[in-house]
Image (cartoon, rainbow, N blue to C red):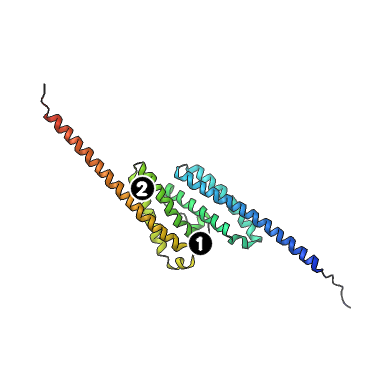
Amino acid sequence: MFLAVNFMSLKEILEKIQDELSEREQVREEVQRDMRKATRLSKQAIQVTHQERFDDAKAMLEEAKRLFVKLRETAKEYPYLFYSGSVGAAFEENAEAHILLTLIQEGRFPSPKEIHVPVTPYALSLGDVIGELRRRALDLIRRGKIDESGKCLEWMEHIYSELTALDDAYVIINGLRRKGDVARRLIEITRGDLTIEVRRSALERSISKLEETLENKTADETPET
């Protein structure tokens, strides 16, 4: 005795496929919207960090974190979405914001695990952090804070040195070598900017000291009336 089997028609099969594809597309669009927002929040966090509005930066990164938590939940059912271009870019921008903020506030580098960022976007973000440190170094120079600007240069050199020591990462991570080349040039011109400012500041002090010496000498030589 044969059991009756209800076979689906080709039309029914294709309709189910269409429904599933439509659902996937809706989820993909939602993920992209969330990742664009997370990227925007991270960029804003970098901007306010430069303005030393650290509490605002932390609030923005906390809001971005909620979007990444939502992404991880979605990725349990749609794992391929976790590796899309928009997700990688969002993680990279987020890591950059976290690293810059932590460096300025605490003088240390947060780990990928600490900030919940995959290792590849974390490594790529370090190249961009060098650019943000140059921006901060120039801001500090304009404010006359030469020592703090020098610290930024030290961080830039440290990041570059450690990244270039990772031979395997340079081969495996697409784009890391290019970021390293850009970082090297930024370090060179920043070192030049800082050197010029240090010399200018030293010259100003020498001139000021000379003027003070001449004024005192003139005062000593002026006859009393």
Residue 123 x %, y %: 47, 60
SS class of the residue under badge 2?
A: helix
Spatial distance from mark 1 to mark 2, Cα to Cα?
A: 29 Å
Dot placed on the residue nearer the N-terminal end, 1 or 2: 1
| Quadrant including the N terminus | bottom right
Q: Amino acid at mark 2?
A: Ser
| Quadrant including the C terminus | top left
Residue 62 x %, y %: 55, 48
Q: Image quadrant of residue 90?
A: bottom right
Residue tagged 1: 120
Q: Is residue 208 left or right of residue 31?
A: left
Residue at horizontal 82 percent and vertical 68 percent from the top = 9
Residue tagged 2: 149
Q: Is residue 225 left or right of residue 163?
A: left
Q: Nearest the camera: 111 or 160?
A: 160
Looking at the image, is 219 positioned above or below residue 121? above
Residue 102 x %, y %: 45, 50
Q: Image quadrant of residue 212?
A: top left
Q: Is residue 210 left or right of residue 51?
A: left
SS class of the residue under badge 1?
A: helix
Q: Give the residue at the far bottom of this rendering.
A: 1
Q: Amino acid at mark 1?
A: Thr
Residue 176 x %, y %: 46, 62
Label 2: how many residues lie within 10 Å, few (<14), some (14-19) or many (20+)? Answer: many
